[in-house]
Image (cartoon, rainbow, N blue to C red):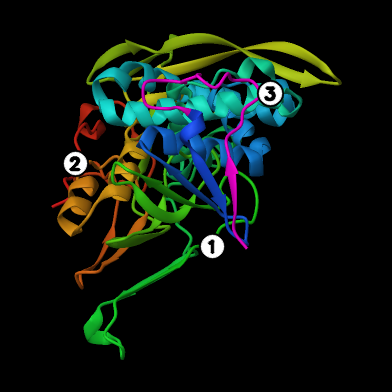
């Protein structure tokens, strides 16, 4: 049995318009017998607003936890474990890259989608204040959304694992990657008895939490029509199918992150050698808020940065990490372009953005095209070095700056 849920917000007057592209009274959310939301609106921005509202109805808790992490405020809610995440967010400078790149890197049409989603989240929080964890989370902004996505993709690229190994003194000489992951396959018509094209998506994710799949159908009058799954807080489908094509993601294991050991100055531990010269570590003092026994305690910490990127100073020395995931903010936009692709040429054009730092992509379309790529934002590295080892952090020969193209 299907039923319609029309937006009837008591907090808005009938004439309220959230932005140029979003009028909540024109958005329809249809939930099927399984509770999956089918969201219909004139514009993509309005659909994003409806997605934010529907996802909040079902899992506002997880969405808030994500934005708390992105805003480096999780310690104020969940205590010491949350403060550790807050430290990582600031060490990785997730917000800094968003602030630097937002205006020049994010396309105007996608900014409207982000603004629509943020407006939906904020409207839900205003309508249901008792469900809000911390008032300071709101209003959520597009930059908050992108900051959280940068954090997630840095973690999926191995940043958290590298930081744990550095701080525990167990950073290995070489990284051994696990072989587990999800499954996907595609068959074109030549390989099927009924002559149809098939795509199977068998993603192995937990049933709840920040990386649990949330199913939705998004349909606008601007050509966005896709059924699939996303993580809580994401403003578009991450894998699924539209009327012309579909794709699946599984985990892949390219070498996406490098760890460098810096050569510190014996006379001044805040300096490191780089191409024969002593460079100064950039030091920033940050303040974490930690919830302890109902009280919020301020804790001050240092974070460091070198030419290579975020840097940790430990008893074992100083180590820096470098990954393409911390140099890019357009991953969510790339998924949006993949959502709206009408054929393989448009889909491959979206892939050429190289904004999603990893994951296998298995693709199939109605035109009998199937495709697979082990996707990644892979640096162009100097082949004189063994890149799975901890690298010397004293030379520009190991400081890569460019990436391989899609080909």
Q: Which residue is mark 2?
A: 382
Residue picked out by circle 1: 204
Q: What is the x, y in percent for residue 226?
A: 38, 53
Region of the chain picked out in magenta, as a range: 1-23
Residue 244, can we see it? yes
Cα distance between the residues tagged 2 and 1: 35 Å
Give the quadrant of residue 251.
Answer: bottom left
Report the Cα–Cα distance between label 2 and label 3: 40 Å
Answer left or right for 128 relative to 9: right
Q: Left or right? Give the position of 121 relative to 355.
A: right
235 relative position to 215: left or right = left
Queried whether the magenta region covers residue 13, the answer comes back as: yes
Q: Give 18 or 99, whichever is nearer the viewer.
A: 18
Whichever of labels 2 and 3 marks the residue nearer the N terminus, that label is 3
The answer to whether mark 2 and mark 3 are in CB contact below 8 A is: no
C-alpha distance separating marks 3 and 1? 29 Å
Q: Name the residue tied to disc 3.
A: 75
Q: Residues within 10 Å of mark 2 (few under 14, many from 20)?
A: few
**In front of the other: 110 or 217:** 217
* Labels 2, 3: front one: 3
């Amino acid at each position: 049995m299907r039923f319609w849920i029309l937006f009837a917000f008591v907090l808005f007057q009938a004439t309220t318009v959230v932005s140029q592209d979003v009028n909540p009274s024109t958005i329809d959310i249809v939930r099927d017998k399984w509770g999956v939301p089918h969201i219909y609106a004139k514009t993509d921005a309005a659909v994003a607003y409806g997605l934010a509202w529907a996802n909040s109805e079902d899992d506002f808790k997880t969405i808030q936890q994500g934005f708390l992490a992105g805003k480096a405020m999780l310690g104020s809610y969940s205590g010491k474990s949350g403060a550790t995440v807050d430290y990582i967010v600031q060490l990785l400078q997730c917000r800094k890259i968003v602030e630097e790149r937002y205006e020049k890197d994010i396309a105007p049409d996608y900014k409207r989608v982000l603004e629509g989603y943020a407006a939906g989240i904020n409207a839900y929080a205003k309508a249901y204040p008792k469900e809000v964890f911390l008032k300071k989370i709101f209003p959520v902004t597009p930059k908050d959304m992108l900051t959280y996505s940068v954090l997630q993709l840095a973690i999926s690229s191995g940043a958290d694992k590298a930081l744990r190994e550095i701080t525990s003194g167990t950073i290995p000489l070489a990284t051994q990657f696990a072989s587990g992951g999800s499954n996907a396959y595609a068959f074109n018509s030549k390989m099927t008895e009924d002559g149809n094209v098939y795509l199977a998506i068998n993603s192995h994710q937990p049933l709840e939490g920040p990386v649990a799949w949330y199913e939705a159908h998004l349909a606008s009058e601007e050509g966005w029509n896709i059924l699939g799954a996303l993580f809580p807080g994401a403003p578009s489908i991450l894998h699924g199918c539209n009327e012309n094509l579909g794709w699946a993601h599984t985990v892949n294991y390219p070498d996406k992150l490098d760890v460098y050991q810096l050569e510190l100055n014996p006379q001044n531990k805040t300096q490191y050698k780089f191409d024969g010269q002593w460079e100064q570590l950039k030091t920033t003092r940050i303040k974490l808020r930690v919830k302890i026994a109902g009280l919020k305690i301020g804790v001050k910490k240092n974070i460091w940065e070198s030419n290579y990127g975020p840097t940790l100073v430990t008893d074992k020395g100083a180590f820096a990490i470098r990954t393409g995931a911390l140099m890019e903010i357009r991953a969510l936009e790339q998924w949006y372009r993949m959502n709206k692709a009408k054929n393989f040429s448009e889909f491959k054009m979206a892939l050429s953005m190289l904004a999603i730092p990893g994951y296998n992509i298995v693709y199939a379309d109605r035109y009998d095209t199937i495709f697979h790529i082990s996707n990644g934002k892979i640096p162009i590295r100097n082949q004189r070095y063994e890149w799975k080892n901890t690298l010397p952090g004293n030379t520009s020969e190991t400081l890569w700056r460019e990436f391989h193209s899609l080909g």
